[in-house]
Every structure is written in structure tokens, then in C-alpha cells.
Image (tube, rainbow, N blue to C red):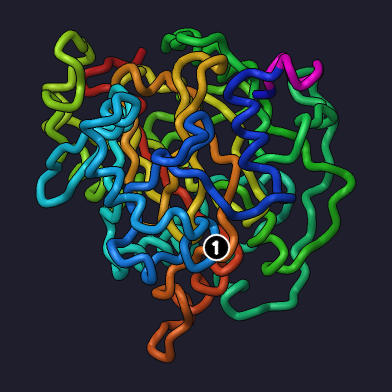
Amino acid sequence: MVDASDAGPSTSYTAFRKTEKHFKNRSSQSRLPTLYACEASRAALDVSRPDRQEDDPVWQASWWGAEQQNVRRRFQRDKGKRPELSEVPREVRCGSKTGYVVSEGCILLPGYLDNEAQLDLLEAALSQYTLPPNPLSISTHYDLPPNLFEMYANESKELIPTLAPCAETPESTGKEKPAERWIGRKTVDTPAGHVVGYEEILSKNRQWTADPPSEKLGSKTAGELMKEMRWANLGWVYQWSVKSYDFRPDSPITFPPNLSTLCVEVVKSVPWDHVLSADSNVGHKAWVNDYVPDTGIVNFYQTNDTLMAHVDRAELDPSRPLVSVSLGHACVFLLGTSSRDDQPLPIILRSGDVLVMSGTGRQNYHGVPRIMEGTLPSHFEPSEKDSVALSAAKRWIHGGRININARQVFPPGFKRV
Ligand SMILES: O=C(O)CCC(=O)C(=O)O
Ligand SMILES: [Fe+2]
């Protein structure tokens, strides 16, 4: 997951890595250049900005300089005149919403979820999606209680013990360290364009063993563990160390029905014939009828977490849509191409935005180099009417961002052996 060039001098960094470093740099917070502004290579695309500047938490938190006032209006006005702006983003009607085609197969639906829907999904992500049998990043290290979030909501001070360390295995010694801290997913990289077949996956399933619990960890409270948790797995279980789903069970863990309904609705709303190029041959005509997510990851970010450049290419059909929802603080999302050497497009993702990656766009490198501090929208502020669970969920999101992304790993009609 780390650029091979990372060990060398800065001049050998890939274009993707340089942009990641630019946005990770905390010494010069604020002053984001926009796509309209001059430094085009690092300029960020911002289409979910509210119409009134004063309503924008990103603006309020001083991420934009005064010179960026009304930048979106100027962007719309000048799009036709400036060739570098005419390609991205192309506007498309998605049902009752507006979408922007930000690159081949990648569509951003700003503000797809209203405030109420965001709060419902926030509560579900923390209180339901973290329940057993869904694996959590911390499941292999701690002897978790049946309901960790409930303990968090009740502000329990009870200590949750670690699991006993077990013998090392050749596949995973637990000693490999990622070159820098990121969202806690240890993976091996695969060559660009590599798509794994079912047989290859089953053989990886047989090799895989879970990470052994670390001996260095100590008991923690639910409050500490809810901050340490980096992801929850939905549906088919992904094995991070071998980058494959575990297809050994007969059926997946039940995928949350409400989330499935949301993702299907998003995919049905996209006018695929207008989004994908005419020569695109990815079977998109079927998606409106047979797209059903069966796996997903919920990413839990604290404001200093990042997600490094990667491609999600473990699904059997490499082009079916991946639907990705943002909640909480805004972030800078980098959308690249199938090569890390190409300059990625920085996109501001706000709470309620939905990004769909599909077709050849599924092979694009992407990552999250920055969660934008101070950008939590006001509907996440506590209210007297909140239930215990919602109030705890709001408390959690004050320190972070949640991303929920769903995919379909088994294309319809696929026969398992
Ligand atoms: O947090 C995000 O917006 C992106 C997450 C992502 O790319 C992933 O989980 O594969
Ligand atoms: Fe991803």
C-alpha cells in the first residue's frame, strides 16, 4: 500500500504521493486552492458547497481564503470559456438529484442525504453495523462485549481485556509495520489492472490466518476502543492481509437492508448511458435491475486519520458500482487514475455526499489524505430530543468522519463451485 518510491528523495515521489503529502501537511492549515484558482495541480473540486457561504462549515472553519468567495458561481460562469474546466465536472440529472461526472464512471451526488437521513445512518453505522457477527478492526485484538457501542453510550468505565496472544504464523507475524499510520488496514498491493478470479480467491482463503493479537496492547474502556476502531465489515468478509473476500461460508453475513435500499436507489437513479462513454463495455444496462450490494466497509476516521492511495479490486466483476457515503466532518478525497504517476483530482466530500465509482473508474487510485477539522455541520450538535443512542453517536462524530461504502462482489448468475 506504500509507494515503492517512498524510500527515495522527494523528487521520486509519484504525483499521487506528492498531492497526498500536500494535503496531509498540517503546518499550513486552511487556504485550500479551488479548481478555479491558479495552482491547478492541487486545486480542489467543491460541488457540495451550500449556496450561501455563511451556511458552509468548511468556509466557517477558514479552509477557504476570502479570495474564494463565490468561487462556485464564477466556476459555473467560466466553465465554457476555460478549457481546463470544461471537462470536469459534467452535470447529469440523477432522478430528483444533480450528479457530477468527475471522471470516467465516477459520479458525485452532492447532498444526496438530507440531515435526517444522515443522522439515521450515523446512528445505524455506530450502533448496528458494529454489532456481532460483523468483524471490526479491533475484533482480533480485544475480547469485545456483545454491544460495545451501548457501553460507549452509557459511558461505562469497565475495562475490556485483550485477547490472549497466540503463536505466530508464517503468513502474518504481526511485526510488519505500515510505513506510516493510516486507517489501520494492512494489505498487500496488487499490480494495476489485476483482477482476481474466483479460484485464486479460494486459494488465498485457504492461506489466510487472522492477525495474531498484539502483546503490547492493554485493556481499554469502550470510549477508548470506539476511538481506536478503524472499520467494520458488512456482508461478505474481506481478508485485509490477502486482499480477498472469504468465500468459504455458504452465504454472507446479512447486509443491512436499509443500506442496501439506499445503494440500489442511488444506482437506479444514475443515467448510465450518459455517464459512461459510448464504447464502454461493462454491462451497465443490467445494473438498474440487478445491482444489489452484498459487501461493504464502514470506515471510522478520527480527524488525524488518513487513508492512503489504493484501488478496491477484489470484487469478481471489477466494474459494478461501488457506492460510498460520507458522514460527519468534510474531507479531501483524492481521485486518481489507474496510475499513481498521474495527478489526482482533489474533491471536497461533505456529510451527505454520495460518490459512485464504476466501470473503468473502479480501477482508479483513490485515498483520503485529510479530514478537515472544524467542519462538522450543525445538525450533529446535541439536541434535548436525542435518544441515548443518537446522543452518543453525535458525541462520536464530533471527533471524526464516517464513510460507508458498499459493493456487489457476486455478479448475478455467478455459479459458486
Ligand atoms: O473514506 C472514503 O471516502 C473512502 C474509503 C475507501 O476508499 C475505501 O474504504 O476503500
Ligand atoms: Fe477505496
Does residue 2 appear to the left or right of 31 in the view shown? right
Q: Does the magenta stretch include residue 76?
A: no
Could you tell me what secondary structure mostly forms the magenta stretch? helix
Q: In this view, does 327 lie above or below 356?
A: below
Q: Tell me what residue is drawn at x 72 percent, y 33 percent.
A: 211
Q: Tell me what residue is drawn at x 82 percent, y 47 percent.
A: 164
Residue farthest bottom in this picture: 384
Q: Tell me what residue is drawn at x 44 percent, y 11 percent.
A: 195
Q: Does the magenta stretch include residue 4?
A: yes
Q: Residue 219: image x %, image y %?
A: 82, 61
- Say which residue label 1 marks: 62
Q: Residue 349: image x %, image y %?
A: 42, 48
Q: In this view, does 46 lie above or below 55?
A: above
Q: What element carries label 1?
A: loop
> Can residue 277 be seen in the rendering of this structure?
yes
Q: Tell me what residue is drawn at x 65 percent, y 48 percent.
A: 305
Does residue 285 appear to the left or right of 257 in the view shown? left
**Extent of the magenta region:** 3-12
Under mark 1, the amino acid is Ser
Q: Residue 341: image x %, image y %?
A: 56, 14
Disc 1 packing (10 Å; few <14; some 14–19; many ≥20): some
Which image quarter is the N terminus in?
A: top right
- Asked if the residue at label 1 sits under 8 Å from ligand 1, the reply is no
Q: Is residue 273 above or below residue 349?
A: above
How many marks do you count on the picture? Answer: 1
Q: Residue 163: image x %, image y %?
A: 78, 50
Residue 324: image quadrant is top left
Residue 168: image quadrant is top right
Residue 114: image quadrant is bottom left
